[in-house]
Image (spheres, grey):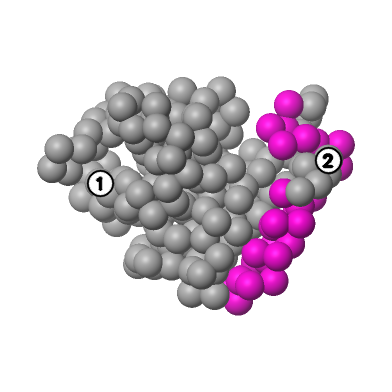
Amino acid sequence: MTAQHDHNVRIKEGKVALDGVFGLPADPRGVVVFAHGSGSGRLSPRNTFVARHLQQAGLATVLLDLLTEEEADDRRQVFDIDLLADRLLLAKHWVETEERTRGLPIGYFGASTGAGAALQAAAREPSNLKAIVSRGGRPDLAEPYLPSVTAPTLLIVGGYDEPVIEMNQAAYDLLICEKKLIIVPGATHLFEEPGTLEQVAEQAASWFSRYRS
């Protein structure tokens, strides 16, 4: 198991300050920035679980609140994919200039609405971005951007998450990059069933490790 350390970070640009948790294993081989879903943030237990798994695979992680506390209280902004993508790109710029991660390949892990933000951000600024993973995501929210995504993209959906399966299948058809769609049997939207979140973490670690360069 790779030793790792968590650091609280604050990413600032102008009047915006985003709080995050930066997980740093020894000698990281890449870094994954998490884009959380509606109503979630840097302390999400599910994304923290996945982040730990990625750290054990030698990947640094950045779990970030993409909205300030005031913004998170406004439901319209929770679903403002343009704003969430802007914030994700702000985090990407921080990773690219942070001494401990500068020069490392970057990946995005998006959950729920955060997957739409990750795909839009990937299309808008593809440099240094090597891979994307979506967990129970809403890639359809980035529909106009999907044909422009170049990073290999893995979509993971629960087998019981029926409306979201259809949304992911439609988005998958619009992607022209290297891509894969995995449906986890017996899993609902939040992957709360025993063993299902472990499958997500393992598939994500494998995908990011495969596309580090």
* First of labels 1, 2 by sequence position: 1
Dot 2 crowding, Cα within 10 Å, few <14, some 14–19, many 20+: some
Q: Quadrant of residue 139?
A: bottom right
Report helix, strand or loop for mark 1: helix
User: Residue furthest toward the right?
Assistant: 186
Q: Distance from label 1 to label 2 (Cα)?
A: 37 Å
Q: Name the residue tied to disc 2.
A: 160
Query: Which region shows up in magenta?
Result: 164-192
Does 38 appear above or below 89?
A: above
Q: Name the residue tied to disc 1.
A: 94
Q: Is residue 26 left or right of residue 40?
A: left
Query: Which kind of residue does numbered mark 1 sit on?
Result: Trp
* The N terminus lies in quadrant: top right
Does 120 appear above or below 184?
A: below
Count of residue discs: 2
Q: Quadrant of residue 28?
A: top left
Report helix, strand or loop for mark 2: loop
